[in-house]
Image (cartoon, rainbow, N blue to C red):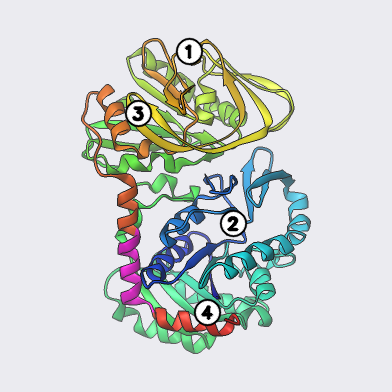
């Protein structure tokens, strides 16, 4: 019953992927493994087996362990919304809203609950692989920390530091972390990994040894650039504009990048379709005129994102697209935007009020404090689908009499009378190859390529195999078992 924590020299250095890959490698060795992230900040979330929600990365890591995601795997989740506030999720359920001013004070009080979740996972498995958040070098955030060294020291979990060589300056980032953090924190670090290396790793031998000499930490390996990562869902919005687009795709699917976009991994299955070019439209750019399908994604602050959509002029693009015969699919918050109005009488997302929608579906949404969290399966467009529902509020109106699908014998979502504007609350529906085939047939092309879940599982095995080749996993395992009191 050991544990090991991966922390990074910064955000987006590949911690989530390496935790997932290490979890799969150890699971393939026959070990019972669980992922854990004390505190996460993300609007990409997944529903858990115990009826809560956790960060999408931890759900992926649970899949890598071949276990169901559980709220203990990410006991504190912050979901950023409008006005510099975040919804606070503890043990899978909403506990309120935190602002920038009171977050640092509030998080320290959550450490006991974080440790309880970690202890339960430790008791139920051979090994827990922990992911940090951001970087321990952010020493201005150290007081009250529960995400990195605050947790590691309280739980007595040894740490391995991850450096990203692809972004440059990896020697300075690893050595600099040792230089700025507290000596007690530095003592928790047992070594480092270099991630995202392109080319011959022998070219970095001198740099690798210099890091060891300057820090006194052991190097556990150099991880090459992992091409299989492109098949995994991403949790961090910083990668959105770098999402791979197929230049040879005959059909353009465009998705505007809204300020509080959430669960944008809903679009990832489209990457498996050779006849699709997925375009993530950044602020300041129009929706491409050649677009066949516009997808309005989920949002953590639907009214605020609807206002941002209008500021960008995307509402004009969307209406012109529909007038010229184009199709639109709204998912969760995007579905709400397509209706006549969104009413927030209780101030769920901010100041109480009402916002006019895009008026492309004959529905109205009323936000409510109770959050709907549930897995679901059924049919849509005549195809089987499975996914989950995660939203606050209820959508009603005459448009729902033409449902997008049927879930558990009840109608779900809405479709316009001409069949070109569709809305649904089901996250993950595009994972169905049959649904993609039915949707793309409406656009005049053939779809329904590879099975999305099989592609993810294959990618996790490929990443695990690379880690087995390039990382001293036996040494990491020994540290996790010996130093965690196992």
Pointers 2 and 1 in contact (C-beta within 8 Å):
no
Instruction: Check the picture and name the quadrant holding the C terminus.
Output: bottom right
Which of discs 2 and 3 lies nearer the camera? The answer is 2
Q: First in sequence: mark 4 or mark 1?
A: 1
In this image, 329 relative to 373: left or right? left
- Residue topped by disc 1: 401
Res. 143 visible in picture: yes
Does 32 lie within the magenta span? Answer: no
Residue tagged 4: 480
Q: Earlier in the sequence, mark 2 or mark 3?
A: 2
Sequence-first tag of 4 and 3: 3
Number of numbered discs: 4
> Which of the two discs, 2 and 4, labels the residue nearer the N terminus?
2
Asked whether the viewer can see residue 211, the reply is: no
Q: Where is residue 448 shown, x and y percent of the image?
A: 25, 36
**Quadrant of image for the N terminus:** bottom right
Question: Which mark's residue is nearer the viewer, 2 or 1?
Answer: 1
Q: Quadrant of residue 266?
A: top left
Q: Distance between the Cα atoms at labels 2 and 4?
A: 20 Å
N-terminal of the pair, mark 2 or mark 1, is 2
What is the secondary structure assignment of the residue under circle 4?
A: helix
Q: Nearer the viewer, mark 1 or mark 3?
A: 1
Task: Give the label on residue 288, or none.
Answer: 3
Question: Percent position (x, y) of residue 143?
Answer: 74, 67
The magenta segment is 460-471
Distance from label 2 to label 1 (Cα)?
A: 38 Å
Tell whether position 466 is magenta.
yes
Question: Left of 301 or right of it: where is 326?
Answer: left
> Tag 3 or tag 1, which sits nearer the N-term?
3
For label 3, the SS is loop
Q: Which residue is mark 2?
A: 74
Circle 1 Cα neighbour tier, 10 Å, few/some/many (<14 / 14–19 / ≥20): some
């Amino acid at each position: 019953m050991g544990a090991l924590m991966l922390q990074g020299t910064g955000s987006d250095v590949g911690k989530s992927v390496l935790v997932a890959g290490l979890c799969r490698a150890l699971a393939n060795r026959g070990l019972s493994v669980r992922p854990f992230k004390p505190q996460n900040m993300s609007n990409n979330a997944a529903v858990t087996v115990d009826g809560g929600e956790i960060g999408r990365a931890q759900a992926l890591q649970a899949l890598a362990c071949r276990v169901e995601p559980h709220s203990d795997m990410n006991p504190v989740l912050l979901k950023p919304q409008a006005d510099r506030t975040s919804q606070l999720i503890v043990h899978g359920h909403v506990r309120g809203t935190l602002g920038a001013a009171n977050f640092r004070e509030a998080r320290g009080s959550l450490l006991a609950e974080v440790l309880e979740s970690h202890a339960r996972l430790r008791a139920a498995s051979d090994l827990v692989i922990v992911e940090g958040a951001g970087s321990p070098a952010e020493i201005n955030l150290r007081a009250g920390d529960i995400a990195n060294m605050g947790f590691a020291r309280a739980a007595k979990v040894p740490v391995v530091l991850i450096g990203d060589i692809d972004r440059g300056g990896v020697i300075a980032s690893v050595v600099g972390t040792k230089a700025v953090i507290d000596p007690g924190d530095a003592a928790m670090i047992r070594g480092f990994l270099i991630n995202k290396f392109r080319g011959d790793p022998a070219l970095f031998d001198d740099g690798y040894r210099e890091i060891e000499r300057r820090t006194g930490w052991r190097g556990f390996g150099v991880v090459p650039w992992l091409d299989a990562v492109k098949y995994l869902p991403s949790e961090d919005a910083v990668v959105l504009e770098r999402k791979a687009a197929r230049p040879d795709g005959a059909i353009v699917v465009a998705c505007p990048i809204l300020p509080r976009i959430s669960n944008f991994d809903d679009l990832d299955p489209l990457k498996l379709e050779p006849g699709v070019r997925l375009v993530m439209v950044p602020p300041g750019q129009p929706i491409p005129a050649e677009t066949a399908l516009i997808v309005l994604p989920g949002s953590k602050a639907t009214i605020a994102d609807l206002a941002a959509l209008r500021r960008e002029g995307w509402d004009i693009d969307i209406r012109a697209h529909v007038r010229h015969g184009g199709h639109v699919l709204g998912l969760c918050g995007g579905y709400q935007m397509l209706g006549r109005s969104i009413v927030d009488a209780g101030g769920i997302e901010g100041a109480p009020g009402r916002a006019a929608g895009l008026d492309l579906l004959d529905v109205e949404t009323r936000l409510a404090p109770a959050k709907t969290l549930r897995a679901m399966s059924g049919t849509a467009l005549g195809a089987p689908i499975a996914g989950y529902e995660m939203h606050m509020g209820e959508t009603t109106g005459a448009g729902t009499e033409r449902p997008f699908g049927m879930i558990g014998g009840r109608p779900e979502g809405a479709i316009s009378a001409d069949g070109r504007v569709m809305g649904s609350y089901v996250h993950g529906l595009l994972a169905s190859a049959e649904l993609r085939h039915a949707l793309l047939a409406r656009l005049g092309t053939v779809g329904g390529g590879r099975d999305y879940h099989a592609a993810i599982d294959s990618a996790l095995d490929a990443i695990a195999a690379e880690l087995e080749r390039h990382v001293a996993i036996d040494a990491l395992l020994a540290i996790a078992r010996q130093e965690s009191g196992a």
